[in-house]
Amino acid sequence: MGRGRRAALAAALGVVLAAGALTADPALAQPTPSAGHGRHADDGGQDGGQDGNRGGDRQGDGRGDDGDGGRSGGKGGSGKQRRDDRRRAVPLKGPVLAEGDAADSKAPTGGGLRTALGGTVQDKALGTLNFAVADAATGEFLFGAQENTPATPASTTKLATAVAALALLPAEHRIATTVVRAAPGEITLVGGGDPTLTALPADQVRIGGLPVDQDSAPASMADLARRTATALKAAGTTEVKLSYDTSLYSGPLLHHDHDAMNIAAVTPLMVDEGRIDPRSPDEAPARVFDPAGQAADSFAGFLKAEGVTVQGKPAAAAAPAGAAELARVESPTIGRLVERMLTTSDNTLAEAVARQAAVAAKQPVSFEGAAKAVTDELAGLGVPLDGVLLTDGSGLAKANLIPPITLVKLLAVAAAPAHPELRPVITGLPVAGFSGTLVNRFGAKSGAGEAAGIVRAKTGTLQGVNTLAGTVVDADGRVLAFALMTRTDADPTAARAAVDRIVARIAACGC
């Protein structure tokens, strides 16, 4: 009976995948969006470039996590009232996994899990293993080892970033890139923190190598230039001086582990996440030295195409206070950005999302301020933070520490009926064998193939570190949350396969 229920859940997920209904895979080809696709009051759009993160946990050299590098404003205030005010349903395209039903399924016991996992947790390829398994429906801890001991989370850090941002920001929140009138004959391009703004034509935009749908398509720099040119010409202006404003962010531009591939310089103004080649399919594409300058030059080129001449080279300068807005485009909603960030493990986007959390929490919009905004909000949600140390939002930092118990509690909170605003954390998790950074895992030769399609999880990879945290439906139809964190000198492929086999045993457990 229980195994039949689980099979039905897996079959249902397969139907959803085939139908393209997963918001975490916004990839079903759509007709080319209309020319006005950058989101303003009544139209929509956002980012460009390929996220190049399709290959998942590929790094064994320590340069980066399992992602590539890639919103604005927010409400202040704090505490339960603010979270209650934001608690609203997030629109989803369809089911992801059926919820565990306490009426006809029960969580496994710790002893049952111990027996089911057996020697899989002793695999030498795992090195040092910290792990935790919890009931996703209740958040109750079921089984683990060193579950309270902090370990390097790598890209599972993005779970913390995602939960905090979605809790702090309203579901309809979008990041705006604007143009304001700085002075007669002068305009300023103002970065709001959207790294996904694109210079590509709509039908060339790819995320994780796949085309985008209307909800996930990024804002267009060409649209912004078109709207700006229309406003300028209406005022009788066809020649301007252009400056660009990056004053939203403070602190260092470069991540401590910046390598100009896994992550771009962290600035509130960029186009196609600072890629040198926005069409590159590389998992860690080369980045420009000055993303903000690149974005301004791109904008100037689009203005010229619209019949507006830009005098000289764009210069960096803060926009005057109260400057009148001429035009704007906006990113997809925060939920769609979080899904993209998690599915493709996008480092640049993760740092941008963390800074949106900092803006909303009225913290300094920097690495340090973003980390404080995230941890403060998680504490307010009741997530245990003993041993947690965050220094970034992406997980590239080797200094980050999170215990497995914190990761499973994050997942349980995100799945809780009381927090529908956090649901994109679950829908954004890659599906084993099907999408994002798990597309090449849980294969037939891994020894974990039976769990393909019924596991959703966030990957994490740094040199010597392999982590996986997500949800799985067990043999009795119960949804469980798990977090596995390893440090090992073994071959990364062998270590990841060993991790996957543990998850497959959890999925097979009717215990």
Image (cartoon, helix red, strand yellow):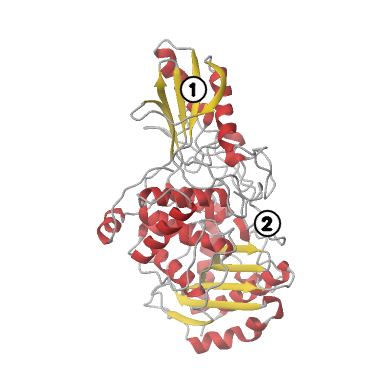
Q: Position of residue 445 (x, y in %)?
A: 73, 70
Dot 2: few (<14), some (14–19), or many (≥20) neighbours within 10 Å?
some
Residue depicted at x 53% and y 14%: 307
Q: Position of residue 161 (x, y in %)?
A: 47, 57
In this rendering, the answer to whether 272 lies above or below 163 is above
Extreme residue toward the top, this view: 236
> What residue is pinned by disc 2?
63
The image shows a total of numbered marks equal to 2
Q: CA distance from mark 1 to mark 2?
A: 39 Å
In this rendering, the answer to whether 70 lies above or below 95 is above
Name the mark on residue 46: none
Q: Position of residue 500 (x, y in %)?
A: 63, 71
Disc 1, disc 2: CB below 8 Å? no
Q: Secondary structure at mark 1?
A: helix
Mark 2: which amino acid?
Arg
Which of the two marks, 1 or 2, is nearer to us in this view? 2
Residue 492 as seen in the image, left or right of residue 145: right
Q: Secondary structure at mark 2?
A: loop
The residue nearer to you, when weighing 317 against 170, is 317
Mark 1: which amino acid?
Arg
Residue 258 as seen in the image, left or right of residue 421: right
> What residue is pinned by disc 1?
226
The mark that comes first in sequence, 1 or 2, is 2
Extreme residue toward the front, this view: 251
Q: Is residue 438 visible?
A: yes
Q: Is residue 96 visible?
A: no
Dot 1: few (<14), some (14–19), or many (≥20) neighbours within 10 Å?
many
